[in-house]
Image (cartoon, rainbow, N blue to C red):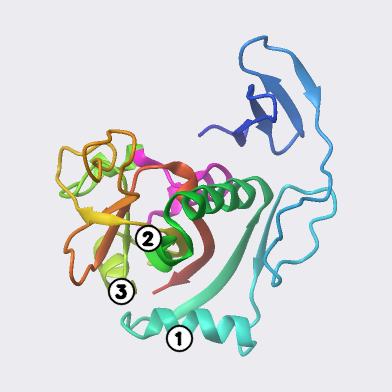
Amino acid sequence: MNNEVSVDITAPDCTVVKVNLRTQDATNWLTGVTYKVKRHESEIDLPKQWEPMHEEFFKKVELQPKTPEYELVAQGFLKTAKYNIRKIERVQNLFLWQAYAVCKQRIYAKNGPAEVGEMTLYHGTSAESCNCIEKDRFDRSYAGTHAAAFGKGVYFAVNAAYSASRFSPADTSGLKRVYVACVLTGRYTVGKSHFKVPPPRGSDPTDCFDSVVDNQQTPSMFVVFHDDQAYPKYLITFS
């Protein structure tokens, strides 16, 4: 992603527009026409922990140590990852959250409430990738850079230690980074390396699984193939 910091959004009339988060301009993909966008109050509930967004579309908030929110995130990470947490930041991206919420509604309608499968999982990354993830979403194109044993999607670990040790390279200051993500796992099956999308559940090719895993009975890894199926809720920086 370049310095433009933009995200693709599907408008109510099904046209696709690219919204520049810095200039708050929207460009129609088909016509090339650019216009200003104005944020209205969303019908989708935002997380109660978020600070007010006002006219902003993106905000990153560092959590204060010892607060209940900080302690909850830290405890989940430190349960398996034995590192020194330097800071925890909350990612507030209005567009990405709305897209995630719509995806959740779609899976709910397809599977019913018992099989939405919303989970808190971990995703290790480099310092260079953080801006892209927070302002544009988790990118499936990175899968080929690392291991893709269960499909060409975005990988999330059940245990923070796995993401922290294997997929979080240290920067020049020795700092490493892991995202705490909300992930919609839905109905899942065991993945295969050639998968580009989840396989069909039965004879209907349009009725597919929502994600794939490394082990059907006791998954330690989930792989999703749709950009809106995961939201980067917190970034933990540690050493």
Q: Rate crowding at label 2 as few (under 14), some (14 to 19) or many (20 or more) other CA atoms within 10 Å.
A: many
Q: Quadrant of the C terminus?
A: bottom left
Q: Residue furthest front?
A: 203
Please report whichever mark, 1 or 2, sits nearer to the chain's N-terminal start.
Answer: 1
Calculate the distance from the C-alpha at mark 3 to the C-alpha at mark 1: 12 Å
Q: Amino acid at mark 2?
A: His
Calculate the distance from the C-alpha at mark 1 to the C-alpha at mark 2: 16 Å
Q: Is residue 66 above or below residue 39?
A: below
Dot label at residue 123: 2
The residue that mark 1 highlights is 75
**Direction from residue 185 to residue 181 in the image, left or right:** right
Q: Rate crowding at label 1 as few (under 14), some (14 to 19) or many (20 or more) other CA atoms within 10 Å.
A: few
Q: Is residue 84 above or below residue 203?
A: below
The spot of residue 199 in percent (x, y) is 23, 41
Residue 175 visible? The answer is no
Residue closer to the observer: 227 or 21: 227
Residue shown at 40% from the left, 62% from the top: 115
Q: Residue furthest bottom?
A: 66
Which stretch is magenta?
124-140
Secondary structure beneath label 1: helix
The spot of residue 203 in percent (x, y) is 21, 37
Residue shown at 34% from the left, 73% from the top: 160
Q: Amino acid at mark 3?
A: Asn
**Direction from residue 169 to residue 14 in the image, left or right:** right
Tag 2–tag 3 contact (CB < 8 Å): no
Magenta-drawn stretch contains 171: no
Judged by its main secondary structure, the magenta piece is helix
Residue closer to the observer: 181 or 77: 181
The residue that mark 3 highlights is 159
**Direction from residue 39 to residue 182 in the image, left or right:** left
